[in-house]
Image (spheres, rainbow, N blue to C red):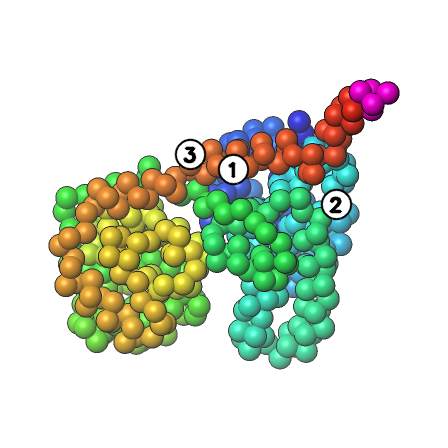
Amino acid sequence: MKVAIVHYWLFHMRGGEQVLEALCEMYPEADIYTHVYDPRHVSEGIRRHKVQTTFIQRMPFARKMYKAYLPFMPLALEMLDLSNYDLVISSESGPAKGVIVRADATHICYCHTPMRYLWDQYHVYYKGAGSLSRLSMPYLLHRMRRWDVTSAARVDHFIANSNCVAERIHKFWRRDSEVIAPPVSIDKFYVSADHDDFYLCVNELVGYKRVDLAIAACNALQRRLVVIGDGPEAKALQKMAGPTIEFLGHVPHSVLRDYLSRCRALLFPAYEDFGITPVEALASGRPVVAFARGGVRDTLIDGRTGALFAEQTPPSLIEAMIRFEAVEHVFDSEFMANHAAKFSRAVFKEKFAASVARQLSSPLTMPFRQEPVQRSLLQAIQ
């Protein structure tokens, strides 16, 4: 069976690329197709595969300005010749699922989320865009939405990375999906007996991550907070931070593991599709205080693995921190680490393989497999 994996773009190693890396382990002979590729910034496991790009790669400054070429990406995908492949797996967050496959091939889409800038976050992106972009966005993204919905019909089976993404798939594409959590490398983290008195926030410093809530809450409560990460909001966040807040910027993975194992709790105020960092904190035996929307609804248990807060406001987070501190002594590191094991890479690969097997055996998704059955029925009738 020949396998192709279609990923939106490849020039860093984030959650989507960790899924791709796991798929590469499962299908070592698979070919990878993507719009833009920079091998310097992806893992060896991905680089070992044959990677082919669309014509977007040859556009000027594509590695930096890839989002400017979004209107061309549907055409680029449809120009890919995947006629030699029996199984096509698309990894969707940007445009990836719109490829055209053979009639008797199976197309499975692992969806991190429908494109947020087309759907539920469109107005947020529009307000933050430059004046020139705001002139073109309504028309171009209107056309992209039409293609996005149409191309969803080309997929045989959707797998969502969380229940909130499954809800979006149903809302925007009117398709059902199976939920399989993405792989988390929990074996790289460890439980420590030594804990410190600081809260930890690990995030890219951009607006929607809402690191400002963690800073405001710790300013008000005079709690120590260590912020790991960098981004365009760094200076503004440092300006609002009080004396109990420390910024470390980007750190090596060994430093991140150390801080996760020693923190009082991880503060996670973002609304994420899944949220890998909270699972990494649990794998380190540390609780999480998180905004109660998005993927954390699948991964956290209020009162057992941390505390959830209902609104993205400083008072709501402060209330959750006070509630957490009142029962902090009851949280069991071993329970949290065992709970994190449900989201391991091994569990992902097992569930994904089982899902693929079901689809390959289904006559609805593999039409050519019906032929022997049909011939047998005809022979019996005759």
Residue 28 position, x and y percent, is 56, 29
Residue stretch rendered in magenta on the structure: 378-382
Left or right for 233, reference 144: left
* Residue to which mark 2 is pinned: 100
Crowd band around label 1 with a 10 angstrom C-alpha radius: few (<14), some (14–19), many (20+): many
Q: Residue at x 21, y 42 (%)?
A: 334
Q: Quadrant of residue 29?
A: top right
Is residue 72 in view from this perspective?
Answer: yes
Q: Residue at x 47, y 49 (%)?
A: 15
Q: Which callout, 1 or 2, points to the residue nearer the camera?
A: 1
Left or right for 197, reference 62: left
Q: Element under label 3?
A: helix
Q: Residue at x 52, y 37 (%)?
A: 352
Closest to the observer: 91 or 206? Answer: 91
Left or right for 215, reference 47: left
Q: Quadrant of residue 240?
A: bottom left
Closest to the observer: 97 or 354? Answer: 354
Label 1 or label 3, whichever comes before in sequence order: 3
Marks 1/3 in contact by CB < 8 Å: the verdict is no
Q: Element under label 1?
A: helix
Q: Which mark is residue 346?
A: 3
Q: Residue at x 62, y 36 (%)?
A: 359
Crowd band around label 2 with a 10 angstrom C-alpha radius: few (<14), some (14–19), many (20+): some
Q: Which callout, 1 or 3, points to the residue nearer the camera?
A: 1
Q: CA distance from mark 3 to mark 2?
A: 30 Å
Q: Which mark is residue 352?
A: 1
Q: Amino acid at mark 3?
A: Ala
Residue 315 covered by magenta stretch: no
Q: Main secondary structure of the magenta part?
A: helix
* 139 up-or-down from 198: above or below: below
Specify the quadrant that holds the N terminus.
Answer: top right
